[in-house]
Image (spheres, grey):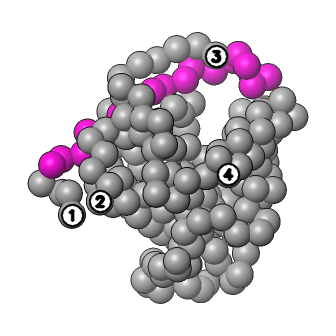
């Protein structure tokens, strides 16, 4: 399924949002995470490998009735992704993961479009809560999450990804009046 973002929000071309797996997505999601976090906080191969393994596991067990993966495309190239892991909700809700947009494409509306479509999908499915983990000191990401209504519910130190960071757990309660 393909959706498009209004061309006015995408200088330099129309951004399309695709739903579901497509060839090249696994490698591109791992690459985007590896490059972005290496530049942002010096992560190395252990982080990129972890993202790759976890995304492969997600795609291997992908259930389109309960899970969602969206990708953003510009000029035919994958520039971003987002996923909802809904097949086994936790007490905190369904989990938002693998959300990234190529830094060269920031400010074009792809991130907001991906997040809005993922949250709309959650509402249509009747999920009451969505949570995510992010890293502190990524102000653009945090602002986007907070504008969508996410709030920090937990903070914990983490050194698994080659560089010690504080992880933030954020949660959004989806209002019942937004259910389709």
Q: Which residue is mark 4?
A: 59
Q: Which residue is mark 3?
A: 158
Position above or below: 131 against 76 = above
Q: CA distance from mark 1 to mark 2?
A: 5 Å
Return the disc, 1 or 2, that comes first in the chain's sequence. 2
Q: Picture coordinates of residue 30 (x, y %)?
A: 77, 49
Q: Which residue is mark 1?
A: 180
- 27 or 151: nearer the viewer: 27
Q: CA distance from mark 1 to mark 4?
A: 27 Å
Return the disc, 3 or 1, that comes first in the chain's sequence. 3
| Residue at the image position 77 percent from the left and 43 percent from the top | 52
Q: Picture coordinates of residue 121 (x, y %)?
A: 37, 60
The answer to whether residue 169 is magenta is: yes
Instruction: Find out whether the residues at labels 3 and 4 contact each other: C-beta distance under 8 Å.
Output: no
Position above or below: 8 against 87 = below
Instruction: Find out whether the residues at labels 3 and 2 contact each other: C-beta distance under 8 Å.
Output: no
Q: Which residue is mark 2?
A: 124
Residue 25's tag is: none
Q: Residues within 10 Å of mark 3 (few under 14, many from 20)?
A: few
Q: Picture coordinates of residue 63 (x, y %)?
A: 55, 53
The answer to whether residue 120 is magenta is: no
Q: Residues within 10 Å of mark 1 (few under 14, many from 20)?
A: few
Element type where label 4 sits in the image: helix
Return the disc, 3 or 2, that comes first in the chain's sequence. 2
- 158 or 177: nearer the viewer: 177
The stretch of residues the image draws in magenta is 159-176
- 75 or 49: nearer the viewer: 49
Q: CA distance from mark 3 to mark 2?
A: 34 Å
Instruction: Find out whether the residues at labels 1 and 2 contact each other: C-beta distance under 8 Å.
Output: yes
Return the disc, 1 or 4, that comes first in the chain's sequence. 4
């Amino acid at each position: 399924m393909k959706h498009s973002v209004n061309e006015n929000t995408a200088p330099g071309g129309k951004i399309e949002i695709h739903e579901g797996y497509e060839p090249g997505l696994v490698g591109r999601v791992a690459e985007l995470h590896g490059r972005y976090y290496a530049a942002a906080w010096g992560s190395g191969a252990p982080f990129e490998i972890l993202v790759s393994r976890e995304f492969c596991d997600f795609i291997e067990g992908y259930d389109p009735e309960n899970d969602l993966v969206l990708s953003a495309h510009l000029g035919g190239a994958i520039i971003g992704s987002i996923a909802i892991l809904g097949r086994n909700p936790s007490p905190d809700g369904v989990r938002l993961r693998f959300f990234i947009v190529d830094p060269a494409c920031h400010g074009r509306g792809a991130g907001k479009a991906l997040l809005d479509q993922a949250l709309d999908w959650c509402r249509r499915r009747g999920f009451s809560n969505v949570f995510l983990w992010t890293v502190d000191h990524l102000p653009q990401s945090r602002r986007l999450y907070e504008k969508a209504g996410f709030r920090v519910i937990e903070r914990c130190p983490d050194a698994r990804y080659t560089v010690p960071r504080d992880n933030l757990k954020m949660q959004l309660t989806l209002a019942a009046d937004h259910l389709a």
